[in-house]
Image (spheres, coloured by chain):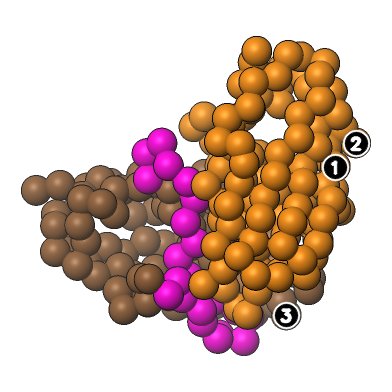
Amino acid sequence: EIVMTQSPATVSVSPGERATLSCRASQSVSDNLAWYQQKPGQAPRLLIYAASTRATGIPARFSGSGSGTEFTLTISSLQSEDFAVYYCQQFNDWAWTFGQGTKVEIK
Amino acid sequence: QVTLKESGPVLVKPTETLTLTCTVSGVSLSNARMGVSWIRQPPGKALEWLAHIFSTDEKSYSTSLRNRLTISKDTSKSQVVLTMTNMDPVDTATYYCARKQPTYWGAFDIWGQGTMVIVSS
């Protein structure tokens, strides 16, 4: 099973600043990597798929990069509605795994 | 507009079998590339993928839980059903069903609202 490791567990950022979240896979997943945002009491929302493609309706301040085993989600200028937990997820060999999440909190 | 909605018991006893239903609207489960997964999330913890059923009726299961899980679908009712045997308090979680993108990529683009399941005697 491919293990996804996210860092940091929590990041404190001021509104308007940039946030950079990392995700590492225990083996290559090529570019089959997605990012989700989850707010309390809500289902996750797809932000990025194919490592760097924004899902429908996702603002341009969200960007993804990476391939193989190292991936990054960048939020260029944090808005109040962006404070949430973010998960990465891989799909390989007909199985999926999620990272443990990174919480983006207000500094 | 594609929507998914989970239903099932809120409370189950230890050792019982859990049956959850995901009702899909706006698309047929027989459509090519229409696949649905079950994913759970214990309170305050991370998401955990459980099982997936493809449009071809092929199934895939989490390695750690495969002995306890069965996923199936009823295309005529537009429902995907998950059963989990031998429930334990550690299985307390919100259970989501989600649609895999109808493309090569493995992301889940549409999620249900989730259903909370508590395992307690």
Under tag 3, what secondary structure?
A: loop
Whether labels 3 and 2 share one chain:
no
Residue at the image point whose x is 81% and y is 25% from the top: A18
For marks 2 and 1, give the CA distance. 7 Å
Q: Position of residue A89 (x, y in %)?
A: 63, 57
Chain letter tied to orange: A
**B118 and A17: which is toward the camera:** A17
**Disc 1 residue crowd, few under 14, some 14–19, many 20+, Cα 10 Å:** many
In this picture, is A18 found above or below A29? above
Which residue was labeled with disc 3?
B32
Residue at the image point whose x is 25% and y is 52% from the top: B90
**B51 and B32: which is toward the camera:** B51
Letter of the chain that mark 3 sits on in the rendering: B
Q: Which residues are magenta?
A: B42-63
Under tag 1, what secondary structure?
A: strand
Which residue was labeled with disc 1?
A63
**B21 and A44: which is toward the camera:** A44
Letter of the chain that mark 1 sits on in the rendering: A
* Chain B tint in image: brown
Whether labels 3 and 1 share one chain:
no
Which residue was labeled with disc 2?
A60
**Disc 3 residue crowd, few under 14, some 14–19, many 20+, Cα 10 Å:** few
Do the residues under discs 3 and 2 have CB atoms within 8 angstroms?
no
- Give the amino acid type for the residue marked by disc 3 in the picture: Ala
Q: Position of residue B75 (x, y in %)?
A: 54, 77
Q: How many marks?
A: 3
Do the residues under discs 2 and 1 have CB atoms within 8 angstroms?
yes
Left or right of B83 in this view: B51: right
Q: Position of residue A40 (x, y in %)?
A: 52, 29
- Give the amino acid type for the residue marked by disc 1 in the picture: Ser
